[in-house]
Amino acid sequence: PSELGPFVALHKGRPLQRQTVVTCLGTLPRAGPEGTPDCPMVGTEAGDILVLDPEAFTVLYKGSVPSPPAFVVPRGPADGRYRLGVAC
């Protein structure tokens, strides 16, 4: 309790960040000519599933599951209808 005031004063100007641990990785294939990069998929300890753009590294899809994912398996191309199988 006595350390709370100095801690808040030290960190009050900093933006809030949410850091988490990666629990699984995968790739979601993209339709296109040979050599087209696949979309990376990341599962996190917070239960988030992220599909990233392979060129700009922006988030194309963000979903969540009730517990940390252990495996992520894609079905279908990223440019069309796809499904993600997730084992927690």
Image (cartoon, helix red, strand yellow):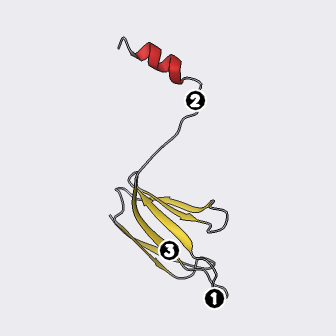
Question: x, y percentage for residue 85?
Answer: 41, 73
Q: Are marks 1 and 3 in contact (CB under 8 Å)?
A: no
The residue pinned by badge 2 equals: 14
Reading the image, the residue beneath label 1 is: 34
Above-or-below relation of 6 to 74: above
- The numbered mark, 2 or 1, whose residue comes first in the sequence reads 2
Q: Residues within 10 Å of mark 3 (few under 14, many from 20)?
A: some
Q: How many marks?
A: 3
Look at label 1 and name its amino acid.
Glu
Circle 2 crowding by C-alpha within 10 Å: few under 14, some 14–19, many from 20:
few
Image quarter where the N terminus lies is top left
Along the horizontal axis of the image, is 80 left or right of 72? Answer: right
Query: Where, by quadrant of the figure, is residue 87 drawn?
Result: bottom left
Q: Which mark is residue 27?
A: 3
Upstream in the sequence, badge 1 or badge 3? 3
Q: Residue at x 59, y 25 (%)?
A: 13
Q: Is residue 11 above or below residue 24?
A: above
> Along the polypeptide, which appears first: circle 2 or circle 3?
2
